[in-house]
Image (cartoon, rainbow, N blue to C red):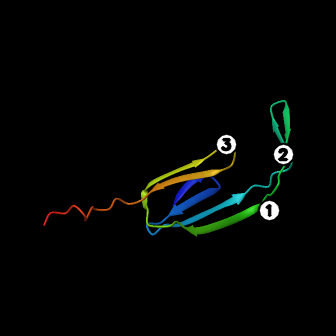
Amino acid sequence: MLTLTGNLKCEIQRDGRVHIEGVVPNVQGLLKSSSTIYQMKFQQRNPPGPFTISFNLPGPVDPRLFSPNFRSDGILEVVVMRPKTQDTNNSSR
């Protein structure tokens, strides 16, 4: 399991099973940055607290070749590679 931030963990298994768990922070509608105040507008937002999500990728993967990126816009982007397979079509006889 890889911890991406203090509140977000992602586990990818060889069979393509993905499990993500984390905590949605209790954020009010205003953010302050030095002297500037930003008002956030949400179309959809999960309630604050812990969450988990699990799903299956379409095939096996190599979890060692796992590249997560938690973007500044709040999107978790993950790239994972398929395992290398041996080419059986060109084997010598």
Quick one: label 3 or label 2, which is nearer the N terminus?
A: 2
Left or right: residue 5 compared with residue 85: right
> Which residue type carries mark 2?
Met
Q: Are marks 3 and 1 in contact (CB under 8 Å)?
A: no
Q: Label 1 vs label 2: CA separation? A: 15 Å
Number of numbered callouts drawn:
3
In this view of the protein, which residue sits in the foreground, 60 or 53? 60
Query: Residue 72 appears in which quarter of the rendering?
Result: top right
> Which residue type carries mark 1?
Pro
User: Residue at image x 45%, y 69%?
Assistant: 15
Left or right: residue 73 compared with residue 68: right
Q: Quadrant of the C terminus?
A: bottom left
Circle 3 sits on which residue?
Answer: 72
Q: Are marks 1 and 2 in contact (CB under 8 Å)?
A: no
In this view of the protein, which residue sits in the foreground, 72 or 3? 72
What secondary structure is found at the residue carrying circle 3? loop
Q: Find residue 90 and report its horizontal and vertical position in percent.
A: 22, 61
Circle 2 sits on which residue?
Answer: 40
Query: Residue 26 appears in which quarter of the rendering?
Result: bottom right
Circle 1 sits on which residue?
Answer: 47
- The 10 Å Cα crowd at callout 1, few under 14, some 14 to 19, many 20 or more, is few
User: Residue at image x 63%, y 45%?
Assistant: 71
Quick one: label 3 or label 1, which is nearer the N terminus?
A: 1
Where 5 falls versus 10 (above or below)? above
What secondary structure is found at the residue carrying circle 1? loop
